[in-house]
Image: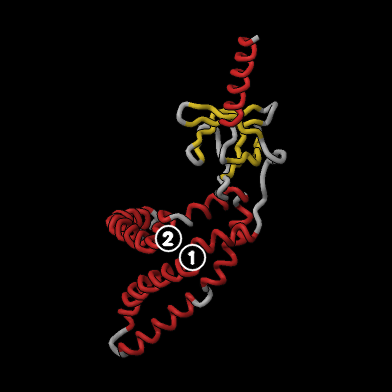
Amino acid sequence: MKFRALFGGLLLAIASAAFAADELPITFNAVLSMGKEKRFGVASDGGARSAWLQIGQQFEGYTLQSFEDTTQTLILARDGQTFRLPIAGGSVQTLNTKATIADANEVMTKLRFEQMMGKLIDQQKKAMNAAAKQMLGPLGADIPQKDAEELQAKLTEALWSELKPEDLKQDMTKMYAELFTKDELRSMSDFYGTAAGQALIDKEPEMQQRMMNIIMPRMMAAVPRIQQIQQEFMQSHQKPAAKK
């Protein structure tokens, strides 16, 4: 009797320990099914939520090891131990989760779109001003430099007058909502909210400028070859001179 009682108590203790081990600080909220592929949404007790995760990815130090479809249970692993995490509140199964304007607007806000676009436009204005000076050069000595500069300013203003960052933001927000899913926009928003994401936004104008500094010399190096091809083409299509 003592042995049976001891054995039974041991089994109860083991079962209790196993049950307690699965009481994780994580909630398994949803399954996103896309054909044969599945992704999983989980959240921490502290309020952090994951993007849609795949098997093999991690959240809060736990690795998603496998998924039992019949029981809707997610198997997690950490520090050599495995844990069973049943879904809470039923699964969400859909081929696509349509994004809303609000989802896209959150990304635009994290991007600081108007500020970033303003910097890019200013850079392009400077580049076009330099190009315009070259174009206005052959206008002749009779045109005062001041008048040429005023003309250049008017041309620049006319060109960029319709490119207002606030208007572009509305159009881009609509485009993002149409092109991306809710989950994709949420992942973008999460990234742009990080230090790395903000650094990418801050350095984007300089990256664009440096990229042009890399590209333009290579393009200019091709000009002689382009001129040669054009000249050869024109020569091959010249009509022979009429015989007198």
Circle 1 packing at 10 Å, graded few (<14), some (14-19), many (20+), is: some
Q: Is residue 66 above or below residue 29?
A: above
Q: Is residue 207 above or below residue 33?
A: below
- Which disc is residue 112 wearing? 1
For the point 56% across and 31% down, the residue is 21
Q: Secondary structure at mark 1?
A: loop
Q: Amino acid at mark 2?
A: Ile
Tally the numbered discs: 2
Task: Examine the rendering and report whether any part of residue 208 can be seen.
Answer: yes
**Disc 2 + disc 1, Cβ < 8 Å:** yes
* Residue 145 screen position, x and y as percent: 30, 87
For the point 47% across and 38% down, the residue is 61
For the point 48% across and 57% down, the residue is 193
For the C terminus, give its image quadrant: bottom left
* Residue 33 screen position, x and y as percent: 66, 36
Circle 2 packing at 10 Å, graded few (<14), some (14-19), many (20+), is: some
* Left or right for 133, reference 194: left
Residue lying at the far right of the rendered structure:
90
Q: Which residue is mark 2?
A: 201
- Between residue 9 and residue 174, name the one nearer to us: 9
- Between residue 24 and residue 190, name the one nearer to us: 24
For the point 44% across and 80% down, the residue is 155
